[in-house]
Image: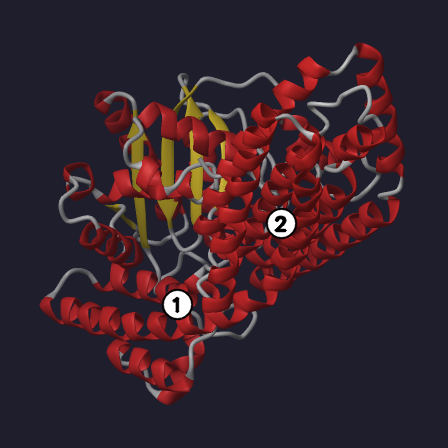
Amino acid sequence: MKRKLTAITGMLCAAAMTVSMAACNNKNSKEAEVSTFVSLDINPAIELTLDTDNKVVSAVGSNEDGKVLLYGEEGLIGVDVEVAVEKITDLAIDLGYINEDNKVVQASVTANGEVNASNIRAKIDAKVDAVADKAGINVEVQTLDSYSLNRKLDEFKAKYPNNGVIQALTVPQFKLALSAAETGEVTLEAAVEMNTEELIKVVSEAHRQIEAYATEAYNKAKAEAMSAYDIAAGLVLDGVYSEFYAKNVISHPTTFYYGAAYQAYKLSATGFNAVADVLVFAEKIGNYPINEARVEAVASALGLTADKVELLKDSDGNITVNSIEAYADKVFKNLGETEEVKQMQAELTAALGYAEADVKAEIEKAIEKYAPQIETVLNAATTAVDTMKGALVLLPEVVTNQVDEAVKLFEDVAAELKNVLETGTLNEATLRGYADALNARADEILVNINADLSDEEKAEINSRRAELEGKLADAKQKLESAVTEAENKAKAQIERLKGERAA
């Protein structure tokens, strides 16, 4: 399991800031029994989850156009899926997403029962057709089978040629697993092993935490702000036990190393996870602008002349793998399946493969800027380890063996990570692995600490923690300001794009 973007959301819900409170409040609402996942790809791309009565539990735009379409709209949650689809189709027509050049809607329904899925799919198809007919547009509703999804699925299958579950995946199954993986709660490899019910619950719960304006830029900015806060808070708070034990060696002569051990493990895990939260975004290949030579190859594969290359740009004016796939998905689904189209797709896939290889090299350079944060965490944790080492001469042999073990685990991780930093192969998965191992040891030591301390001593530590938390006011203010700024920018962008569409 990957962890969520830090467990600070509760603090943000309580703070007087302009972060959407709906996402926070949803956590405390009674969870509906979700049973169905619906994906609509008009470009915009929309995802819905439904309860057992086929009423909408959650609705999100899964790409930028999807967010633009749904932004500021009400009347989707709690209504029958047909009502929601009617509104979405009306909006898509009104905003010009469905027109004579883009009149193919791809849809998939994944549910616990095939009969129920077929019935819902039939209702969706009929409703899209009826709304489009009323607008004078002859829309074709197809099974979800986009170019970009097929490309990702082919790559995933090629990566695991001997995995029977992966090799048997259909596009709709892969789409649901991919949506679950994109929540950050599970890896794609874990998602494909989960059953449909589990995946739908993961997606639905994540939907209800997503702010309507949460663009990729907003999510990255928020992650960076929260990562900085987590590291700052860890440097202040994770040493509270170490501080206590250092002052109370006489009353805890054989256990006073607990505090330093906990600090080393917990601080490292906190810091590694904080940086990993940011690397999730840094490692997203699809978001990086590709170079001119690769753009030319893509344009050639798609048959675009120089004056039409603008069509490949995203709303920020960049040409990325994601923006290219968004354009290609729309073009290919409207062209239909012909040998000529298949050849275009093959050429585009090859061109994108080369572009992604270039981007991976750029990502390695971009990730280097996070190395100082890791080094700061390692240095602080090493100080705690050095404290344990210094205590060895004072401890009986049975205790020194325990300290030696604690020191070795940390020093092994630190040595491996320093090598990673030197070789430039730092990545999110590596940091998560180290963090998980260190968190597990920190939890073990915390059990020992709780057994070792009296109620009075625990109260003293809690009082000290509250005092230290008060010293984090500046860090909290920076966090809140950064999140508010990111929110305002995201809202302005979505509102601008919707206004341009509606004009």
> Vertically, is 217 above or below 13?
below
Residue 40, position in %: x, y? 37, 44
Farthest-out residue, bottom? 306
Residue 233 in the image: above or below residue 459: below
Type of amino acid under label 2: Tyr
Q: Foreground residue, 409 or 58?
A: 409
Picture coordinates of residue 345, whole percent (x, y): 21, 68
Crowding at mark 1 (Cα within 10 Å: few <14, some 14-19, many 20+): many
User: What residue is shown at x 67% (from left), y 38% (from top)?
Assistant: 388
Q: What residue is at 75 percent from the left and 34 percent from the top?
A: 242
**Left or right side of 314 for 41:** left
Q: What residue type is labelled 1?
A: Val
On the image, the x and y values in percent for residue 116 come to 27, 22
Tag 1 residue: 321
Q: How many labels does the image show?
A: 2
Disc with the residue nearer the chain's start (2 vs 1): 2
Q: Which residue is drawn at 54% across and 19% down?
A: 31
Label of residue 97 in the image = none
Q: Is mark 1 on a helix, strand or loop?
A: helix
Q: Which quadrant of the view contains residue 320?
A: bottom left
Q: Name the residue under label 2.
A: 213
* Front residue of this view, candidates 431 and 305: 431
Query: Element under label 2?
Result: loop
Could you give the CA–CA distance between mark 2 and mark 1, rounded to whole angstroms?
22 Å
- Could you tell me residue 170's position as x and y percent? 20, 41
User: Dividing the image into 4 quarters, which one contains the N terminus?
Assistant: top left
